Image: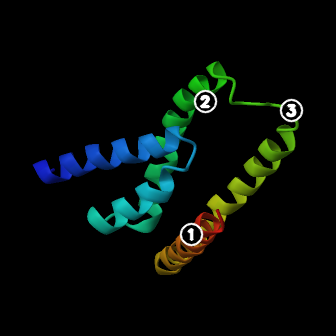
Amino acid sequence: MSILSIVLNVLFGAVSGVFGGLGMGGGTLLIPLLTIFLGFEQKLAQGINLLSFLVMAIFSLIIHFKHGYVHTKGIWPLIIFGAIFSVFGAILTGFVPTKLLRRLFGGFLCILSVYQALKILKN
């Protein structure tokens, strides 16, 4: 592993960690960073993102609980259906070609960008 690769890994981890800690989805940044700048395949980048998310989520959740930013009322349906459909999505990923997965993720990011830009312009 080259020094540049190590520096980029540290930088990308820091950026995605900050955004993940803010609750804004560090993976939205981490996946494109890993695929574009480090040449990871889409599925591998998604797997790395999921693993790093677990660690970041634990620490972020503890801090958010301490500050009173987590309300658990009515959360169980979200957790249950989120878990069920995450299994479905993980299985589906195994059947979707990497090229299509990249395009779908890119399309998702484009739609998200337009939505956020329109939201900002309204205010």
Q: Is residue 50 left or right of residue 77?
A: left
Instruction: Give, as a three-letter code, the residue at label 3.
Output: Lys
Query: Distance from label 1 to label 3 (Cα)?
Result: 31 Å
Instruction: Give, as a three-letter code, the residue at label 2.
Output: Leu
Q: Name the residue under label 3.
A: 73
Mark 2 nearby-residue class (10 Å; few <14, some 14–19, many ≥20): some
Picture quarter with the C terminus: bottom right
Question: 10 or 116: nearer the eye?
Answer: 116
Query: Distance from label 3 to label 2 (Cα)?
Result: 16 Å
Could you tell me if residue 102 is visible in this image? yes
Q: Name the residue under label 2.
A: 61
Q: Mark 1 points at which residue?
A: 117
Residue at (88, 38) in percent of width and height: 74
Which residue, as the protein is rendered here, is positioned at the far front?
123
Residue 19, x across and y down, in percent: 47, 46
Q: Is residue 87 left or right of residue 77?
A: left
For numbered disc 1, what is the local secondary structure? helix
